[in-house]
Amino acid sequence: MPRPQSPFVVQRRKNVKTYILSINPSSGVPARICAEWQRKSFQNLPLALAQYRDPQNKSAANAGAFALIEHLKKAEGQSRLPSDQIQVGAWLEKFTRIEGNPRGARIIAKSRPYSINTIIRYESLYRVWIKDDPICKLRMEETEEADALEFISRLANRKMVRKDLEYKMAGTESLEKVIKFLRMAFKEYQRQHPKWHNPFRDVEPPQNTRKVDRDALTEDEVVSLFSPGVLNDVMELAVAASMFMAGLRRGEVFSLKPEDLDWRTPQIHVRRAWQNFDRKAREMGPTKSHAERLAPFDEVLQEAIKKLWEKNGKHEYVFSFANGSTPGPSWIQGRFKKWMKRAGIELNGRKITPHSSRHSLASLLEARGVSLRYIQDLLGHSDLKTTKTYLHSTEGTIREVGKKIGEAMQGPERMEPGNIRKIS
């Protein structure tokens, strides 16, 4: 008699302390989802299961797999329509929460589950621009293209009132976001009702030609940030280096753990990030791209982290104060402006924010002839297939800039090889 198939398979990756799992049809999860959930990292588990994303042993990995199976079953069950009488408003509201989201189980299976920020954005769009519109009272089954066009016409001229002040629809960008949200939601309904005519199928959102809202620093300006008197302590040096030389997002910087640092290669394993970083309700989750990646680990950053640990001790997270707490969004926002001022960097109308560090690194590498495909990979904008090649291609450039930064940190005197200026 053949042995029953296990509901899941958990495997430990070779040479690293991480686990992957595969879900089998015997788990009770629909076959189409099982087919897509094969050999996936635990970092891709949904936010509701964030506590299972970093299993330290096989037992913890098994517990995470069981929890995921139950979550997928629940999401699949709740996504089914109770009847074909559901109204537009009720259907759209389903997309403003994690549990029972019509797309939930399917995108989880593709390893791209919703983040908190996405749900918050959907909830805001629905509440501010859609909730009180007449289209919400129509049944999904009876909504026609004319209703969609009338809604867009009303939306373009809509005003919202706050504290006795009137605000019109906030231009092309807001209109684009609302229409894209509706197209996504109505397309999902059509997946469950193939014979139904989608009224938003042929409605294209307006094209937003607004320029990128952040600018980049020049190479000389980046180097000037590391000059004496700009970064006042070793925490500031380490954080600035991780942003400008490794291209990490703020939420990724402060989620780094000691085991993420490979001192031999050297490189940084970017496995997680704080979700909803700017709000009190932040949670640990996957990176924005929902994929692990590797980032450069330059000598300047290595030495800064060593000095940081000597001063504050080694804690759960790399960038920790002596009491084990980590810097928050207000810490980096306030200091970033001071760094610009101390370095004598003139903004001249440019919008320079902490996220500009990533734009600055990308511009620097592009100017040195590095392929855009590899730059996107380093910054987490694509999968990991070319990460190793990309790091090999750019390590010389980053090392050269790191040398300039090391020299700038010495002030007038040149830095001896392997010697990093001491910062208290």
Image (tube, helix red, strand yellow):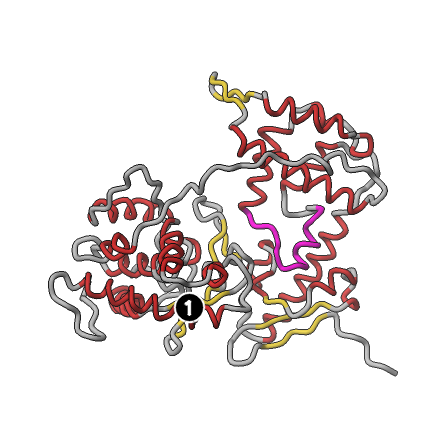
Between 239 and 74, the one nearer to me in the picture: 239
How far from the left and from the top, in percent, is residue 351?
Answer: 35, 41
Q: Write the start and end of the magenta stretch as one range.
A: 102-116
Residue 408 lies left or right of residue 386; in this view the side is left
Compared with 339, 34 (above or below) is below
Determine which quarter of the picture holds residue 226: bottom left
Question: Going by the picture, which residue comes out furthest to the bottom?
Answer: 1
Within 10 Å of the Cα at label 1, are there few (<14), some (14-19), or many (20+) other Cα atoms?
many
Amino acid bearing label 1: Ile
Q: Is residue 186 above or below residue 67?
A: above
Question: x, y percentage for residue 112?
Answer: 61, 56
Residue furthest left in the image: 412
Q: Which residue is mark 1?
A: 268
Q: Is residue 73 visible?
A: yes
Report x, y in % for residue 333.
33, 45
Residue 406, horizontal then vertical, whole percent: 22, 65
For this rendering, which residue is in front, 354 or 152? 152
Q: Which image quadrant is residue 105 in?
A: bottom right
Quarter holding the N terminus?
bottom right
Determine whether 396 is above or below 93 in the image: below
